[in-house]
Image (tube, grey):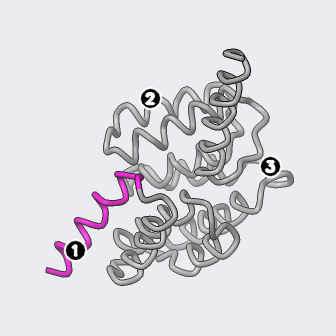
């Protein structure tokens, strides 16, 4: 009975984690686990720890496309061209729909570093309306990249309804409320 209960709780934890994140094409469980830890660290503004986990994910699977997406999104603007080249050199044949959307964004950023991804985030949320990470990225890009506080707030409120206990979202909402005065 105890073993069954432990398996059930463990399965729910893994299922919940999987439900939060966008799907990835990697088959490396270790790389994906490091990617998810990186996402959690970045979301909680622990950038150094997030980068360390991202490095682990890429060491485990250098072709983990979403890890390259994170690398580009969190890199200083001057470092992005080389990271974009590296990410876009990966084989795109077996990417998930989420990865294809983000790859399209990266192609646009390669052509225009100031490109604002409002349409890409709409596509991501349309493809994954119940995936918290899609809403989180849409909120962050709307607010920080596009400077569209209203769109950022809309995505953040959707995320709050979907995952009311996801604390990093409230931090972002707080900054948006301050921006709105």
Disc 2 is placed on an element classified as helix
Disc number at residue 52? 2
Check the picture and name the quadrant holding the C terminus: bottom left
Q: Is residue 116 left or right of residue 107?
A: left
> In the image, residue 39 lies at what x, y percent?
49, 43
> In the image, residue 98 lies at what x, y percent?
69, 61
- Judging depth in this view, the residue of 177 and 49 nearest the camera is 177
Crowd band around label 1 with a 10 angstrom C-alpha radius: few (<14), some (14–19), many (20+):
few
Residue 117 to residue 171: above or below: below
Disc number at residue 91? 3
- Calculate the distance from the C-alpha at mark 3 to the C-alpha at mark 2: 24 Å
Q: Is residue 3 left or right of residue 165?
A: right
Q: Quadrant of residue 147?
A: bottom left
Say whether disc 1 or disc 2 marks the residue closer to the N-terminus.
2
Disc 3 is placed on an element classified as loop
Q: Is 172 included in the stretch rendered in magenta?
A: yes
Read off the residue under disc 1.
Answer: 177
> In the image, residue 169 lies at what x, y percent?
37, 59
């Amino acid at each position: 009975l105890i073993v069954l209960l432990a398996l059930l709780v463990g399965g729910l934890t893994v299922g919940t984690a999987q439900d939060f994140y966008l799907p990835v094409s990697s088959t490396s469980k270790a790389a994906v686990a490091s990617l998810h830890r990186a996402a959690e660290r970045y979301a909680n503004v622990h950038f150094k720890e997030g980068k360390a986990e991202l490095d682990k994910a890429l060491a485990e699977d250098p072709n983990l496309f979403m890890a390259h997406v994170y690398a580009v999104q969190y890199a200083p603007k001057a470092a992005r061209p080389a990271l974009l080249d590296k990410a876009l050199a990966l084989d795109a044949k077996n990417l998930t729909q989420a990865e294809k959307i983000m790859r399209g964004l990266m192609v646009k950023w390669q052509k225009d570093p100031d490109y604002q991804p409002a349409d890409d985030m709409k596509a991501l949320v349309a493809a994954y309306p119940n995936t918290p990470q899609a809403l989180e990225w849409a909120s962050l890009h709307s607010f920080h990249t596009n400077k569209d506080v209203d769109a950022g707030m809309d995505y953040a409120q959707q995320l709050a309804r979907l995952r009311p206990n996801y604390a990093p979202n409230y931090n972002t909402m707080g900054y948006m409320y301050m921006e709105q005065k």
